[in-house]
Amino acid sequence: MEIAIIAHDGKKAEMVQFLNEHSEILHQKKITLISTGTTGEKVKKAGFEVNALLSGPLGGDAQIAARVAEGKCNMVLFFRDPLDKHPHEPDILMLMRLCDVHNVPLATNEATAKLLVRAV
């Protein structure tokens, strides 16, 4: 199973903490993690194996959206910061739309991510 992880700058530490808290589930189920570039760097420093794509503003969100459309990505955990502006908002909306189109589970906050990961 491939899970994409994305976190806006103000949520990256929260994502690393979330992964640490759920590392046993991720290892047991042999989850493959992919991420946008900067999130991937932070997650790698925390000791996780992750295939980091481009940074979100440079096309990473679009790369993950393409994997969703191709049926390669099975779940998206996107810790969004709703109180900040993001220049790549069109890519974010495209990713969210493609998750809906292809019926891929999408968590945009930690509470929903917990439910999805525990259901794996």
Image (cartoon, rainbow, N blue to C red):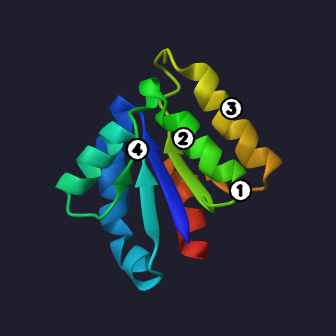
Instruction: Give the residue pinned by disc 3.
Output: 94
Graded by Cα atoms within 10 Å as few (under 14), some (14 to 19) or many (20 or more), the crowding at tag 3 reads some
Task: Identify the amino acid type marked 2.
Answer: Gln
Instruction: Give the mark nearer the N terminus: 3 vs 2.
Output: 2
Q: Secondary structure at mark 3?
A: helix
The one of 49 and 81 positioned closer to us in this rendering: 49
Query: Identity of the amino acid at label 4?
Result: Leu
Q: Residues within 10 Å of mark 2 (few under 14, many from 20)?
A: some
Name the image quarter holding residue 37: top left
Dot 3 amino acid type: Met
Q: CA distance from mark 4 to mark 2?
A: 7 Å
> Which disc number belongs to residue 53?
4
- Compared with 44, 8 (above or below) is above
**Residue position for label 2:** 63
The residue wearing badge 1 is 104
* Residue that appears at 68% across and 32% down: 94
- Secondary structure at badge 2 equals helix
Which is in the foreground here, disc 3 or disc 2?
2
User: Exactly how many numbered labels are in the figure?
Assistant: 4
Mark 1 or mark 3: name the one nearer the start of the chain: 3
Question: Contact (CB < 8 A) between labels 4 and 3?
Answer: no
Type of the residue with mark 1: Val
Q: Do tag 1 and tag 2 residues touch (Cβ < 8 Å)?
A: no
Q: Is residue 37 above or below residue 50?
A: above
Residue at point 78% right, 52% down? Answer: 102
Secondary structure state at the residue bearing disc 1: loop
Vertical arrangement, residue 16 with respect to residue 92, above or below: below
Badge 4 density bin: few <14, some 14–19, many ≥20, Cα 10 Å = many
Q: Is residue 13 left or right of residue 63?
A: left
Q: Earlier in the sequence, mark 1 or mark 4?
A: 4
* Relative depth, front residue between 18 and 101: 101
